Image: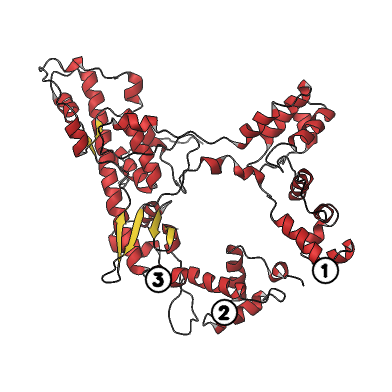
Amino acid sequence: MAMDLQLTGQLKQELQMKLTPAMLQSMEVLQMPLMALEQKVATELTSNPVLEVDSAESIDAQEEPPEQSEDSFDEKELDVSPEKSSDSFERLDNLSNDFGEYSGEEDVYVPLKSYASDEDPKMDALQNTADSGISLQQHLLDQWRLFNTDSETLQAGEYIIRSLDERGYLNTELEEIEDSAEFSSDAVKNAHELVKQLEPAGVGARSIRECLLIQIEQDDSANPLAEKVVREHYDLLIANHLPELANKLGCEMDQLRDAVKYLSHLDTSPGLLFGQEMDNAPVKADIIVEEDAENGDYIVRLASGALPPLNVNEYYEKMAADKNTPSETKKYLQENIRSARWLIEAIAQRRETLLKIAAYIVKKQKDFFVKGRLGLVPLSMQEIADYIGVHIATVSRAVSGKYAMCPNGIVPLRDFFSSGKLEGVEDGEAMGAESVKEVLREVIEQEDKSKPFSDKKLCEEMEKKGIKIARRTVAKYRDQLGIPSAKMRKQYE
């Protein structure tokens, strides 16, 4: 049976949305925290020749450029190599989905200085580049190279150090290291014992128990009972069965409590002292909220004073528009002018969007600035998006990684949002989840620690305060607050 194959044409109407480089630039700038944006501006000032700081003092300090004839524009040196021009917009294709809390693993934060000076701001940015923090592996390798041992053990030690996770733990079995790297068993074991002697104490451990033992062994002032507790009765310790533990050890409860108190001060994640946490830039508020003493309202403003006012260099604009400018130079200038304008417009749009969102948040969450988290009311991103006339994704990008400095301290903008309403409040007022969590925290703090409330009892105590809440919700909120169960909260006399 033969098949008759034919090619036919068909028209299909389809609506598509394509993101232009300008839109990508705007999205990128909007979701950047202030410190990340300062970094970006500093980078652009050093890489884009047409972008400059527009400040009265810096303009006054500049000398007028000498007059140029129409055919002499090519005398000014410009780097218009293919590598420079072709890479001008590649960064727009690598837009991050979520900046989160701004930290740069590869980029280095460049603090922008005040531009009300006669100094070259681009040179200031270069001179004020911060040094990056040392990683955990580098810190350990610097110590490891001081050991005087055989070559195979040194190599095995380096392998072990590079295998540690961010907390400083070794999650690979020693036998696997022997097989994968073809080290002898003795070399791997010796190297592992030496790695455990490095600082910070506790690195190289394969479990929390081993991490605690390493720190106890290296501490000359360690509690004498602590090592026995961890080494022989660890299961009873983590189950908080202190009376049974004291009975097995043949010690007084006060002695055991002292040992437990000592253990609580040991670090179960020694590696977190290094690496990513050291590379994180410090938090910087994007929004300032201040109380108006006259009427009791709150004033919202942007904390973007560190960002210099930017503009496009007029000289280069004329150069790009001049018909006698070589085509290659003109194309390069036009691309950089376009990029500079996109950045300037994106920053202006970011300011406008952030200010609208912050103003609505402060208006809606006014009680927060008086009562703290107990004053938070339910607020969704969709509500703000509808109010200011943008997509909810725009609100999400705008508040991501942003902070507000207010009378209560520095607060992440996301903390002002609370999903849904909780029913059962006696006065009929809708309470946000964060407010309920704060009430729950207070109830637990005031309980008798020798007879802590169970989750069921917590429900009853919450209901006395006008909040009717299910037991499973209490358990969920308790976990989110980092509060252990009643069994683990119990303190023995």
- In the picture of the structure, the residue carrying the numbered disc 2 is 462
Q: Are marks 1 and 2 in contact (CB under 8 Å)?
A: no
| Residue 167 on image: x %, y % | 65, 44
- In the picture of the structure, the residue carrying the numbered disc 1 is 243
Chain-order first, disc 1 or disc 2: 1
Chain-order first, disc 1 or disc 3: 1
Q: Which mark is residue 370?
A: 3
Q: Residue at x 30, y 54 (%)?
A: 353
Chain-order first, disc 2 or disc 3: 3
Q: Which mark is residue 485?
A: none
Callout 3 amino acid: Val
Callout 1 amino acid: Pro
| Residue 198 on image: x %, y % | 71, 36
Local crowd at mark 1 within 10 Å, few (<14), some, or many (≥20)?
Answer: some
Local crowd at mark 2 within 10 Å, few (<14), some, or many (≥20)?
Answer: some
Q: Residue at x 88, y 66 (%)?
A: 247
Badge 1 marks a residue whose secondary structure is helix
Badge 2 marks a residue whose secondary structure is helix
